[in-house]
Amino acid sequence: MRKIILTCSLTIGIAFLGFSDILAQEATAAEGGGVFQVLKEKFIEGDWKFMSFVLVTLILGLAFCIERIITLNIATTNTSKLMSRIDSKLAEGDLEGAQEVARSTPGPTASVLFEGLKNAKNGPEAVEKAIVSYGSVQMGLLEKGLVWISLFIAIAPMLGFMGTVIGMIQAFDMIEVAGDLSPAVVAGGIKVALLTTVFGLVVAIILQVFYNYIVSKIDSIVNKMEESSIGLVDVMAKHGLFK
């Protein structure tokens, strides 16, 4: 799924860059076209050589964010309903049925409970050890890709600042060539420099919002996983699975 999302996102980005000339003509001709039109126009004014790096950072960052959000939504399980079904099976003395319920339910919580049920005959210590060990594995899977999102959040403003520095250097080069400190000589270079900074910060802000949402989603899943794990041990003890 991640490869599909990355491919689609990169295709969109390449298409956007490929039609930059057409967008430039539209941005010049359009007047009062709304926020999107203004952003598009300013993006083009910022010089594609600098802005393209910021755009690629946004596309890749959003690709990882979308992949994580889809994966976490799929991983979200109704733990109360799951525990109720497992409790019913264990009350009937059907350990294999309880395992089948956990095995057939998607999500990390069900996977952790299944590992605990598999070790029921080895005592409560073995169950707790299996839950803790496999819970760590599931935590790693939930947090997969977050390091890349963090990287793009850090890189986006850096690329913007780099564009700013390069733009300022070009502005001073113009001053040196013209031999004049006229605002008209340096205005274009400074404008490009500041636009790259603005868009780099905008990209970082967008990705940071998604990142915080993803982290909160992971925390919610982990909390439910821990509650269900504790509840499983209690349920197994209540139905006399530990000898």
Image (cartoon, rainbow, N blue to C red):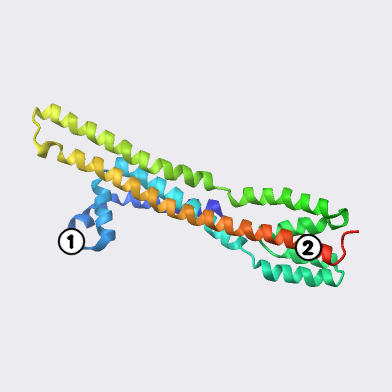
Q: Residues within 10 Å of mark 1 (few under 14, many from 20)?
A: few
Circle 1 — which element?
Answer: loop
Left or right of 103? Residue 174 is left
* Position in image of residue 181 (x %, y %): 10, 32
* Position in image of residue 147 (x %, y %): 52, 44
| Amino acid type at mark 2 | Asp
Circle 2 — which element?
Answer: helix
Which dot marks residue 184? none
Which badge, 1 or 2, comes first in the chain's sequence? 1
**Residue visible at 48% across and 47% down in the picture:** 149
Q: Is residue 10 visible?
A: no
Left or right of 86? Residue 108 is left
Q: CA distance from mark 1 to mark 2?
A: 67 Å
- For the residue pair 120 and 45, the one nearer the viewer reads as 120
- 114 in relation to 14, above or below: below
Q: Residues within 10 Å of mark 2 (few under 14, many from 20)?
A: few
- For the residue pair 162 and 209, the one nearer the viewer reads as 209
Which dot marks residue 31? 1
Q: Is residue 214 visible?
A: yes
**Residue visible at 24% across and 57% down in the picture:** 38
Q: What is the tally of numbered marks visible in this picture?
A: 2
Left or right of 232? Residue 16 is left
Q: Which residue is mark 2?
A: 234
Q: Quadrant of the N terminus?
A: bottom right
- For the residue pair 164 and 130, the one nearer the viewer reads as 130
* Position in image of residue 52 (x %, y %): 34, 44
